[in-house]
């Protein structure tokens, strides 16, 4: 089987990571894998640094132009199945596949998302066979697309997390005795990042060893720095920005705060759990699916920073509770959210879609 991952976003994100993990899974099974992505972007650099076969493309935003640029890649590589994330990517890939007369497009719906079914998606479905891939059955049922959609649950490798945790604090230069809280965020989490900063500002006088590390897209921009400065906590915060070594960052934490949503939020929860780090997050149906409240972490209702700070303060003060929650989260990740199951979902989807497309072509 010859598989393509078409990824046009510039940032490295949870969606990028899902594709990278799946790509390595296909390679491990002896399949031919190509990643086509935006040239000169953090995503391209991260895919390439992981040893994947990367084709760099100039992404213009024009469907016809981008399809024309993708077409020779599909033809030269003899692609059977193309994975995409967005409706536009689906339209581009379907247009390019149409010329080769073969292949299926599988559109992966980010965790917690609902697939758009605009004119572009309907037109794409007429040009090439297409299927949907979800991360949870809850998402699939909400989309009401029937049982024909595929499922590939997001997962992590607990053993790799163990190895990273052994050296992570040294890698980040965390001093002994520091009580490090790592906050995983994304560009849409500005309000939740502000809550984390205000919580640190309120707790700092009673917790002099408390430090906050912000990691993810949008964590190192001017607005975030200005908020930290206005609250007087800049010396207590490390602005790490986007990282493709998330496991090394989260493994250094005593407490994990998930401010991100979607794929970034899910991977944040799973990374913390795999590392045995208890999770704090604002309650949502998606994150509650992964982190059972009171067992692997604490789900916070949207609240005033004073209330949040009081909850976090109690959490920080009870070391036995944090250790127990960390162990429970690790066991849950190892049992229910494995990287192997995620890869199996991608492979099963590609195999089924590829066979269906082959049958249709005959």
Image (tube, rainbow, N blue to C red):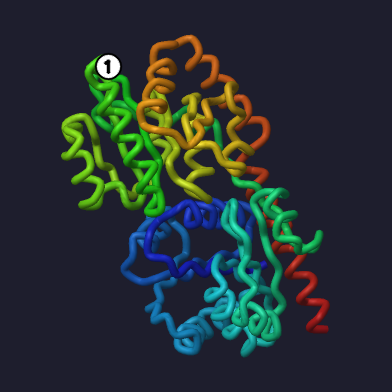
Q: Is residue 356 above or below residue 16?
A: below
Q: Is residue 349 left or right of residue 99?
A: right
| Quadrant of image for the N terminus | bottom right
Rendering coords of residue 83 (x, y %): 59, 67
Q: Quadrant of residue 92?
A: bottom right
- Reply above or below: 244 against 236: below
62 left or right, relative to 77: left
| Number of callouts | 1
Left-right relation of 72 to 192 = right
* Residue at the image point whose x is 47% and y is 30% from the top: 280
Label 1's element? loop
Q: Residues within 10 Å of mark 1 (few under 14, many from 20)?
A: some
Q: Nearer the viewer, residue 214 or 38?
A: 214
Instruction: Give the percent coordinates (x, y) of residue 178.
Output: 27, 19
- Location of the C terminus by quadrant is bottom right
Q: Is residue 145 above or below residue 298?
A: below
Q: Residue at x 38, y 65 (%)?
A: 10
282 vs 122, nearest the viewer: 282
Residue 11 in sight: yes
The x and y percentages for residue 99 are 62, 90
Residue beneath disc 1: 207
Q: Quick one: 51 or 236, which is closer to the camera?
A: 236
- The spot of residue 324 in percent (x, y) is 54, 15
Give the image quarter of residue 165: top left
Q: Residue at x 49, y 25 (%)?
A: 278
Residue pictured at 29% horizontal, 28% vertical: 200
Instruction: Decide if residue 27 is in sight here.
Output: no
């Amino acid at each position: 089987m010859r598989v393509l991952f078409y990824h046009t976003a510039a940032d490295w994100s949870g969606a990028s990571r899902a594709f990278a993990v799946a790509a390595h899974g296909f390679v491990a099974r002896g399949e031919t894998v190509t990643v086509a992505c935006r040239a000169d972007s953090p995503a391209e650099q991260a895919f390439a640094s992981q040893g994947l076969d990367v084709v760099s493309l100039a992404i213009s935003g024009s469907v016809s132009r981008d399809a024309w640029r993708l077409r020779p890649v599909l033809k030269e590589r003899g692609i059977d199945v193309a994975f995409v994330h967005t409706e536009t990517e689906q339209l581009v890939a379907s247009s390019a596949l149409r010329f080769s007369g073969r292949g299926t497009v599988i559109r992966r719906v980010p965790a917690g998302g609902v697939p758009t079914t605009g004119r572009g998606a309907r037109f794409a479905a007429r040009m090439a066979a297409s299927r949907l891939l979800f991360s949870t059955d809850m998402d699939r049922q909400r989309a009401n697309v029937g049982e024909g959609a595929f499922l590939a649950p997001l997962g992590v490798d607990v053993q790799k997390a163990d190895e990273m945790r052994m050296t992570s604090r040294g890698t980040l230069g965390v001093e002994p005795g520091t009580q490090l809280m790592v906050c995983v965020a994304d560009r849409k989490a500005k309000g939740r990042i502000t809550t984390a900063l205000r919580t640190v500002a309120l707790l700092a006088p009673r917790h002099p060893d408390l430090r906050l590390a912000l990691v993810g897209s949008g964590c190192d921009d001017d607005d975030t720095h200005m908020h930290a400065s206005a609250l007087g906590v800049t010396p207590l915060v490390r602005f790490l920005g986007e990282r493709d070594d998330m496991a090394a960052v989260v493994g250094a934490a005593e407490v994990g705060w998930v401010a991100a949503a979607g794929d970034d939020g899910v991977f944040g929860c799973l990374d913390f759990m795999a590392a045995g780090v208890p999770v704090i997050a604002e309650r949502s149906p998606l994150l509650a699916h992964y982190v059972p409240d009171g067992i692997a972490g604490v789900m916070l209702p949207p609240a005033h920073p004073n209330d949040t700070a009081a909850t976090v303060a109690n959490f920080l003060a009870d070391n036995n509770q944090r250790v127990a929650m960390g162990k429970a989260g690790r066991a849950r990740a190892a049992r229910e959210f494995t990287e192997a199951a995620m890869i199996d979902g991608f492979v099963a989807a590609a195999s089924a879609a590829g066979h269906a497309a082959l049958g249709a072509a005959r």
